[in-house]
Image (cartoon, rainbow, N blue to C red):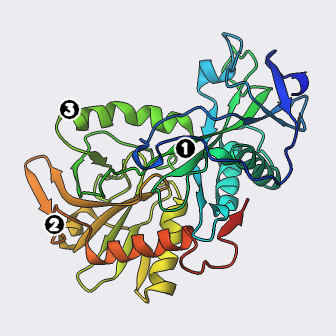
Amino acid sequence: MGCKIKNNIGQQIEKAEPKGDVKMEKKNIDWENLGFGYVQADQRYVSNYKNGAWDDGCLTQNAEITMNECAGVLQYAQTCFEGLKAYTTEDGRTVTFRPDLNAQRMHDTAERLEMPPFPVERFLDAVKKVVKANEAYVPPYGSGASLYIRPYMFGSNPVIGVKPADEYQFRIFVTPVGPYFKGGAKPLTLCVSDFDRAAPHGTGHIKAGLNYAMSLHAIVTAHKNGFDENMYLDAATRTKVEETGGANFLFVTKDNKVVTPKSPSILPSITRRSLMIVAKEYLGLEAEEREVTFEEVKDFAECGLCGTAAVISPVGKIVDHDKEICFPSGMTQMGPVIQKLYDTLTGIQMGRIKAPEGWIYEI
């Protein structure tokens, strides 16, 4: 089975032996009807930080975490995470999409939260190890499903004074997920939130767990009121568009220019950055990142939300209390430009369209 070792929070974990390059038989899963939820896979990756250094890390079959009641993550929310996917391409390869950007973003997030960054090259190696160990859970090409990869890190030793932890654990688990939208992406209805997502000099630009905890009340409130998501405006003036609780905005002007909001408190979405390159280099469109005032939203032809989970979700309507903005693209399907962006990026991810250098990381 492998060797038994102790991690830095007292939990015994089993270190799995490498299995070489043998292809695993796929799990007996109804891939086409898989939901977007957690399915426990066989292996996960664990590395611990103690006495100023990360250990060698290993794969383990143990999905449980045991920690002290005073652990830093439980007291002061010292945690961060990433999200990316592995796919089966048209020619049968298992790949991930731009994981180096996830590694760098997690590095930057850790520095902002006074956590020891997990080295970028080790992040990429850990992703490769954990996907390879769970290759049986990578959905087949054409199923519409993918393997979601969740790297995360947290303060693990007891901390009672308000200060950074001294010990940390970095982990990656994977779970097979179905398409974010069953039966296609129907346009969403958003509301302008009365809550703020991030302060001007706060943590909106990093992927900290605390940002998502803060958004929960706002999204539950939006759902209770019949909306799919929130549109957050800037906290300082409440006149500029920021993002939603978990996705960046993309707008399309009536003359087919792609525009995305620019702000120091917006999370730099990897999907959004990739779509802007796709717009310019693959579709020959003008694309710009700039401040977007809420006042000009009514003048756009199309609107979408972009992120790892759904790539692009079309938006049909935004409600600002008693006022409605209805986009010309309508409430039945994606607008034509957003559809082209979606088709091109997913084509790149699935190997149907040649990718820019370095975008596809083969497992």
**Quarter of the rendering occupied by the C terminus:** bottom right
Q: Secondary structure at mark 3?
A: helix
Of the two numbered discs 3 and 1 on the same chain, state the one appearing first in sequence. 1
Separation (CA) of disc 3 from disc 1: 29 Å
Q: Nearer the viewer, residue 178 or 250?
A: 178
Label 2 neighbourhood size at 10 Å, few (<14), some (14-19), many (20+)?
Answer: some
Label pair 3/1, CB-CB below 8 angstroms: no
Of the two numbered discs 2 and 3 on the same chain, state the one appearing first in sequence. 3
Displayed quadrant of residue 174: top right
Residue for badge 2: 330
In front: mark 3 or mark 1? 1
Q: Secondary structure at mark 1?
A: strand
Q: Please name the amino acid that badge 2 sits on.
A: Gly
Left or right of 109 on screen, residue 116: right
Separation (CA) of disc 2 from disc 3: 23 Å
Q: Nearer the viewer, residue 352 or 335?
A: 352
Residue 83, percent from left and from top = 57, 48
Left or right of 151 on screen, residue 33: left
Residue for badge 1: 176
The structure residue drawn at horizontal position 40% and vertical position 45%, both measured from the top left corner, is: 33
Label 1 neighbourhood size at 10 Å, few (<14), some (14-19), many (20+)?
Answer: many
Residue for badge 3: 224
Q: Is residue 324 above or below residue 115?
A: below
